[in-house]
Amino acid sequence: SPLRFDYADILDPNFVEPDGENSLDTDGEGDDDPAEAAASESDDTSSDTSELCKTDCLQRELSRVTELLSNEELERLHMNIQESSEVYNDDQLDEMKRTGWEVLPDNIVAEVTNESAVDKLYDAYCGPSRDIMAAAKSPLKLFYYFMPKTFWRKVAAQTNLYWRQTLEARLQKAEEKERLVTNRTQRSSAQLRRKLEKFQKISPHEVVQWVGLMLAHVLSPRKQMDQHWNTREVGVLPVGTFGRVMARDRFREISRFIHFTDNTNQAAATDRAWKIRSVLATLEKTFKEGYVLGSRVTIDEGVLPSHNRRNPTRTFMKDKPHR
């Protein structure tokens, strides 16, 4: 099915309301967060509205995905489970809120019991999917499984779009700089535009090469990125390694314009992770298809934020990734 990058899960912690704070959190681990306290005060009053919004968004997304996938893909992704699962009404869910939670004392190790009824919910194969097992025979195929070529085409298109979006601003800056020239004839605005428009569109394979060079830089860092194109050997990388992959000036151009999403999209105002939303959306899709879940799944509570009014537990853990 085609990859989409304009959808942000309503439960994604990076998703904020239009009038909310859309900047990334700071690194101040454990600092007092006044926004956290203010949000907790308004949670009770907005919970009903929030639940309706989330339910509606989830239903719309479920319908969208169901239409895109074939029957075989639906079975592989376990989306047919919803049709066979029991549906609870509001009274039953309220009863589960009161009686369905078992409070354990502190510092206790709870035993995990094997229940045949639970195991029978799904007793078929679980583990890596057939597709990913086939791709695992080659590191390159495995790389393109998780981040397929359609994704890199999207990145190249967004990078070229950003180049076009910034063309007029760069032209204006070049004109201002040209007016300060006194040692030669000043170039006209048309000449400056023609020079800027000589830019060659970035291809998908160049984006992959750019990422590879960035990874190589991390493994064998230099004080300045340009030093990787020097003719003097330093570190473990042979001389000319970077130059054989990409010219230095071309690397600079891609570094200047690389973009994964459209800055002008309205989702940028409410999604704090919009800059890399296409990366997240791609990995979420390919990770789901790469592994078939069994009847029992262990999930770290630190990455499972609760926004359900029927879940009475609300704990602030400053050291968890989703505080």
Image (cartoon, helix red, strand yellow):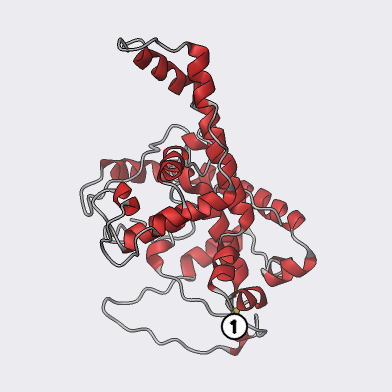
Asked whether residue 139 is in view, the answer is yes
Front in this rendered view, residue 259 or 168: 168
Front in this rendered view, residue 168 or 101: 168
Quick check: 112 left or right of 285? left
Please provide percent x and percent y for residue 305. 43, 58
Q: Residue flagged by tag 1: what amino acid is it?
A: Val
Residue at 61% over, 78% down:
133
Residue at 51% over, 76% down:
297
Which quarter of the image is occupied by the C terminus? bottom left
Quick check: 291 left or right of 231? right
Which quarter of the image is occupied by the N terminus? bottom right
Please provide percent x and percent y for residue 215. 39, 59
The image quarter containing residue 244 is bottom left
Please provide percent x and percent y for residue 127. 58, 80
Instruction: Give the secondary structure at mark 1.
Output: helix
From this view, report whether residue 215 is shown above or below residue 105: above
Front in this rendered view, residue 266 or 139: 139
From this view, report whether residue 301 is shown above or below residue 138: above
Residue at 54% over, 80% down:
296
From this view, report whether residue 65 is shown above or below residue 43: below
The image quarter containing residue 256 is top left
Please provide percent x and percent y for residue 44. 42, 45
- The residue lying furthest to the right in this view is 71
Determine crowd level at label 1: few under 14, some 14-19, many 20+ residues with C-alpha closer than 10 A: few
From this view, report whether residue 20 is shown above or below residue 56: above
The image quarter containing residue 181 is top left
Residue underneath mark 1: 118
Asked whether residue 307 is in view, the answer is no
Q: How many marks?
A: 1
Quick check: 149 left or right of 297? right
